[in-house]
Image (spheres, grey):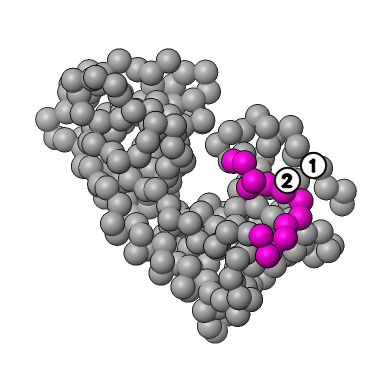
Amino acid sequence: MARRRLVALVVKLPVEALPGHTVPMIDDSKTKPALVPVALVRYQFGPTANVPLHFHEIDGRSLFFFPAELPHRDGQWIFVEFAVVGSDVPCLARGRVRTQQGASVVGSWLEFPIAGLPAIIKNLAKTRRAQERLPVDVTASVRCADGAKLVCRIADVSAEGLRLSGLPFFLNVGEDLSVEMVGMPRAQSDLGKGRVVWVRAQEAGIHFARTGSRRTSLVKLVEDAGAARSTAIQFAHLESCRCRNGERPMEPPRPP
């Protein structure tokens, strides 16, 4: 099947189109180390929270105010893990920090280039996932079954799969491919062969078949991602929040 290039999407989707992240080929000798520290914050909603009142959806993007001081600079892309008490499955989203200047309310606006996050978060209790997804930022070299080779990013990982982002062309659901991290010895970089289980624009979900033992590189990647997650800034939704009464929470003016 002919592959459709996603050149236009690379330009129109800034959430994944970072400079130097999507190229057709790569010179391994000029790459940076594969593992990049991931900026992650976590927010947990209580069972009585009115989630939609915490989001503003404007022109296909979502704004959320994180009511705690963040060390990230204005415009920086970070991962945000939204969780709901009673659910073991979080919603992992990637957004941009919009810091406040001179605001009386401590915190930062977070801007996500998608809409519909409240509905996803509200349905977390109904979601079932065998393995936890952990955010990472890893350059990956992917070889498809038909011989095509591409370089993209690994955006999150679990013990049984991962999510590729910044793809230069569509992958096909059901096709097999090999994934290798760039910038380290092969013995430490080969994540193994997986199968494409879903495709969405510049992204694809990859599932690794169950085997008697896991590749050491995949196990190590999951362990490192888990360790980074344990140190992330966390904030729990306040039971005194005005959203319980149908009002917007305390927020500064929205960014333009």
Q: Nearer the viewer, residue 44 or 96?
A: 96
Residue located beneath label 1 in the image: 5
Is residue 194 in sight in this rendering?
A: no
Residue 10 left/right relative to 3: left
Secondary structure found at label 2: loop
- Majority SS type along the magenta span: loop
What stretch of residues is rendered in magenta? 18-30
Q: Are marks 2 and 1 in contact (CB under 8 Å)?
A: yes
Identified by mark 1, the residue type is Arg
Residue located beneath label 2 in the image: 168
Q: Quadrant of residue 123?
A: top left
Q: Which residue of the protein is positioned furthest toward the front in this rendering?
A: 30
Sequence-earlier tag: 2 or 1 = 1
Please say if 196 is above or below 165: below
Residue 174 in the image: state x and y as whole percent. Answer: 72, 58
**Which mark, by number, is residue 56?**
none
Secondary structure found at label 1: loop
